[in-house]
Image (spheres, helix red, strand yellow):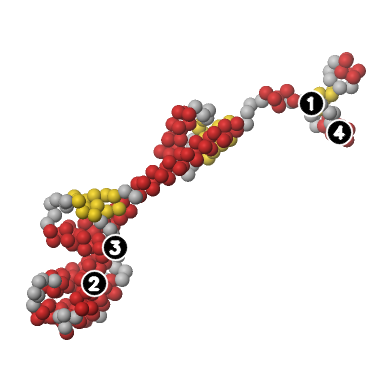
């Protein structure tokens, strides 16, 4: 091995890194030794820490089990995984594969469906729920007496189911309620003037579904709003009856319009 450059030899000796040999032969030969050189080849191996405090305890447990199954030497210091630096590549492959598997599991769960048993529901309640779902743009499927929606829509569907069972039990956001009220008024006015008006006959059922889902407009009493919705539903029910009496449609639509006029 080449000797250290002469210019640095004195500095190294003063720092204690270099020392002259202690024997007579060493003094004669003028040899030097480097302190600590024996440890460089046989010291403890370096380690790498992976701080996984953003992982859930469940995910860390899965990683722990995989590391043990694959026989990767490691230890845990709280949420920190410690491995020998020589095992970095192995450890990272295990972690990458686990993260991919967890992502796939989340995606699969998100793409699943949830079912609602409607066996004990009457026809009117089932139709009302489906009207609500359509008004919200939530796709659904029916399999005999069970209704299915995507998992991502479960929370909102739960609210709509509760709304059918007990309309006053769910507090729904009132944003946009004034617009819905105006749509009810305009549609009712059209039908009061002309029970066969195509725009009014198309707009009123849509406005009714939105009114139920929307909840009472800001500043409006919930029982009052429920009365408005009930009136509007009565107009739609008569209007959609085969051979409906147009005079009755006009009268009911006029009553709904007059009920809304003071607040429009």
Q: Which one is in front in this view, the residue at disc 1 or the one at disc 4?
A: 4
**Element carrying mark 3:** loop
* Label 1 Cα crowd, 10 Å radius (few <14 / some 14-19 / many 20+): some
Label of residue 34 in the image: 1
Please name the residue shown 29% across and 68% down the image.
Answer: 174
Q: Which residue is tagged 3?
A: 137
Q: Which one is in front in this view, the residue at disc 3 or the one at disc 1?
A: 3
178 to 115, vertically: above or below: below
Mark 2 vs 3, N-terminal side: 3
**Element carrying mark 1:** strand
Please name the residue shown 31% across and 48% down the image.
Answer: 112
Q: Which residue is tagged 2?
A: 207
172 to 188, vertically: above or below: above
**Element carrying mark 2:** helix
Q: Separation of disc 1 and disc 2 at Cα?
A: 89 Å
Q: Separation of disc 3 and disc 1 at Cα?
A: 78 Å
Q: Separation of disc 1 and disc 4 at Cα?
A: 14 Å
Q: Which residue is tagged 4?
A: 5
């Amino acid at each position: 091995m080449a000797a250290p450059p002469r210019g640095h030899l004195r500095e190294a000796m003063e720092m204690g890194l270099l020392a002259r040999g202690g024997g007579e032969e060493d003094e004669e030969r003028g040899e030097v030794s480097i302190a600590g050189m024996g440890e460089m080849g046989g010291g403890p191996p370096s380690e790498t820490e992976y701080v996984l405090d953003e992982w859930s305890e469940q995910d860390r447990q899965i990683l722990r089990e995989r590391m043990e199954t694959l026989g990767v030497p490691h230890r845990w210091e709280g949420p920190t995984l410690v491995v020998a630096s020589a095992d970095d590549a192995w450890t990272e492959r295990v972690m990458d594969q686990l993260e991919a598997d967890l992502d796939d599991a989340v995606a699969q769960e998100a793409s699943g469906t949830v079912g609602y048993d409607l066996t004990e529901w009457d026809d009117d309640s089932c139709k009302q729920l489906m009207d609500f779902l359509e008004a919200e743009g939530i796709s659904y499927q029916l399999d005999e007496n069970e209704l299915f929606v995507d998992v991502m829509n479960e929370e909102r569907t739960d609210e709509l189911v509760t709304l059918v069972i007990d309309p006053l039990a769910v507090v729904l956001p009132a944003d946009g309620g004034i617009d819905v009220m105006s749509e009810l008024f305009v549609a009712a006015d059209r039908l009061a003037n002309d029970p066969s008006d195509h725009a009014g006959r198309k707009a009123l059922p849509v406005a009714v579904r939105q009114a139920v889902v929307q909840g009472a407009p800001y500043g409006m009493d919930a029982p009052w709003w429920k009365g408005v919705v009930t009136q509007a539903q009565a107009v739609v029910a008569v209007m959609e009856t085969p051979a409906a009496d147009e005079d009755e449609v006009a009268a009911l639509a006029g009553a709904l319009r007059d009920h809304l006029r003071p607040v429009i």
